[in-house]
Amino acid sequence: MKSKAWTEKFMQGVFFVAACASVLAVALICIFLFANGIPAMREIGFIKFITGEIWRPGSDQFGILPMIVGSLYVTAGAVIFGVPIGILTSVFMAMYCPKQIYKPLKAATELLAGIPSVIYGFFGLVVVVPIIRQFGTALYKAGIVDNPGNGNSILTASLILGMMILPTIIGTTESAMRAVPSHYYEGSLALGATKERSIFRVIIPAAKSGVIAGIVLGIGRAIGETMAVIMIVGNQARLTSSILQGIRTLTGNIVIEMGYATGLHREALIATGVVLFVFILIINFSVALLKRGADHE
Amino acid sequence: MKMKKFIAVLSVVSMMAVAAAGCGSSSDTSSAGDAAASDDSASSSEWDAASAITVVSREEGSGTRGAFTELFGVVDDDDNDITTLDAQVTNNTSVMMTTVSENEYAIGYISLGSLDESLVKAVSIDGAEATAENIENGSYTVSRPFNVAVKNDLDNPVATDFMAFIMSTEGQAVVSEEGYIPVSEVEAYAGEAPEGSCVVGGSSSISPLMEKLIEAYAEVNPNASIELQTTDSTTGMTSAIEGSYDIGMASRELNDEEAAELTGTVIATDGIAVIVNQNNPTDDLTVDQVKSIYIGDVTTWDAI
Amino acid sequence: MSNKTTIGDKLRTYLKHPGSFIVMLLVMLAAIITFAVLIFLIAYILINGLPHITPSLFSLEYTSENASVVPALVNTIIMTLLSLLIAVPFGIFSAIFLVEYAKRGNRFVEVIRLTTETLSGIPSIVYGLFGMLFFVNALDWGFSLLAGAFTMAIMILPLIMRTTEEALKAVPDSYREGSFGLGAGKLRTVFRIVLPSAIPGVLAGVILAIGRIVGETAALMYTSGTVAQIPDSIMGSGRTLALHMYNLSSEGLYMDQAYATAVILLVLVVGINALSSVIARKLTKA
């Protein structure tokens, strides 16, 4: 009996240690990123680093404001394209889709999530960029914009990222909608509401926490995406006011220059990673807060 | 309610982004707008010289970019890179080539060894075509060395022997076969083909050539195994100093710190080709023209 | 419901509620856009890749002539197994702790939840930076499969934890009570009763994790290195299929082979997805 009790205790300890692994991992990531990034920020000057508009590592100018704005731009763009289409598609999947074609379509959305981002990048470069360039030229000729851009632009990146976050949004939104008790829907129909009214006034509000979770996951994916974005966004490290112009994102800044960077330049890139990490932390914490708020309601 | 709050937060964030961009737009040199398109009748498929040039550059710090800016003088008095901030940046040769082959008004530059003339057109610089011969005879001046470096006290017999192979007639034959410019005055390989292994790593520009060299070496010395790490020039040099690579590769000159610990050898010379779209009627550019394009002084093709 | 109402009825309702009709059209349009995009993407990959799948692409040794995918494929399998070997025990054990042992409302549990969610939100490029700083440099493992596998393990840990946790929670309490009632200890109950009934959920998580490992580029670029051969040991460097494709495409010399590799990658992903649904079906039936 005694040995058995000992095993119980021992295994409980093992489980506890395993559970600490994720805490340890986050702690390690924080320590190593901050330890390598903070000195550079201090050397450059934190304010100068965050709000500097010029990034010329060759002449020791490290301002990442263009990259911060760039990441926000393409993420906002991805949300504008991805979220409405994603939510409407999950409405289709949950409420309209005929049974016979549901399975292949569901598998298809999962496949969309499994395609490596490099492929999205090349697809964007070869297919979407020329279309956007022609679109830009047409607008320019019509006198709507004063710079046609060259196709590698915020708009292009937003479109591709919007595609890339579709599966995330569809997956979470659809399961949230399916989790809404069916009598909500039936009740609404019985009261004479049309199918569409019932879906958008009853089901989606009831599933809102799942829908929001999906959107936030999508935002996380969009802001962290790297390989596809660097191929299509132009990567100019300067601010711009036109969505037909290119810009550089935080992730792009790291991947593009990490290879050749030394000394302060390299540390500044790691510091860029720290800024990105802090962005993700802020997003995560706001989700946690939103969730907690929802639980208390 | 939560949904509305969330949307409100989201819109505030995006508004902030717009505002921030608005503040910075003064630095945006969208001078292409005033170079008015006088030729409205031209359809988009035809060459329109009034169109803005799409300048494509490599990433800051890359060997190719370093060599390019230095050779074309795209630097200020303190040797700082002053490539226009409106230039698109890529860290990838194929993205560079794809962009230029898809965009009629683009200009870019790549290693001569990677040039694919079925996709893009290399322009002559100051009248000299970008060919290996012209680099050898000195009329095409846009070239850079491919360096490999070993520790001053290298004691790996395979690495030593492999170095000897690279600098032999056989090794240099591979170099010229691949479209790079070989080192002159080499002798035939007379190594003893020792057993063992070694690690070669560094610049991604050199690694396609190195891959061929390793394969050629495997034929003369089947006893050795050589591992190739494709990273970048700086990692190549630091890892060679630390000892994790026996031979480091750099597509640029060694800096002083590196040169103190390492012995560098030029194994080949690589030309840098300035490339434009095949529909672009421009065949010849001068060094100054390329410079003014990359500095941002000239933004349309007809202004050259 | 749909079989009772005729199309005419439907049209009549929509005539009365034009707003609803527009919404319905929008829903259909969105679905069409989504699937058109997907079909377009897949067609694009297949058209560019299929013609270049040649026998030489499957040679055992990688050379610059054949750009063989076999070493990369083997590396992908090694990488997947190693990462799972590290992450699965940790993931399952911590899920067991959270569901079976931790007291409800425990502060520490909340901390674990929060860190797990943080981990799942970190972009892969940040994992890459961390892996390079910690495993490659600080622990001095160099670019190696092991460094890559540990980085990937941390990356997939939250995925496995979450799915296992859900699966454990779904096991009815009556199972546990029955087991206790028969005199089994807690440990025995967990391993003999609870965990076996949660296996389908755990497997679903594992398969999702495999998909993530197979498609990963940014995190592995800085940790497992880019050697195109199968390394002698796990301390050696080797590139996985996704990284292989990225490298093939980046110098511009092997675009055809890169597309062909993309097709193989796609087939792999489809295979993994299909496998997961087959396993899920088998297990839920049994």
Image: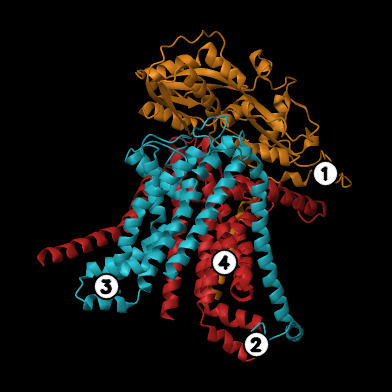
Q: Say which chain is orange.
A: B
Q: Residues within 10 Å of mark 3 (few under 14, many from 20)?
A: few
Whether labels 1 and 2 belong to a single chain: the reply is: no
Q: Is any part of residue B28 visible from this angle?
A: no
Give the residue type that dot 4 points to: Ile
Q: Quadrant of the C terminus of chain C?
A: bottom left
Cα distance in 3D space between marks 4 and 3: 34 Å
Q: Circle 3 — which element?
A: loop
Whether labels 1 and 3 belong to a single chain: the reply is: no
Q: Are the two marked residues, 4 and 3, in contact with CB atoms closer than 8 angstroms?
A: no
Q: Chain of mark 2?
A: A
Q: Circle 4 — which element?
A: helix
Give the residue type that dot 2 points to: Ala
Cα distance in 3D space between marks 4 and 1: 39 Å
Task: Give the mark nearer the N terminus: 4 vs 2.
Answer: 4
Residue named by callout 2: A193
Give the residue type that dot 3 points to: Lys
Residue named by callout 3: C103
Nearer to us: label 4 or label 1: 4
| Image location of residue A199, percent across then percent down | 61, 80
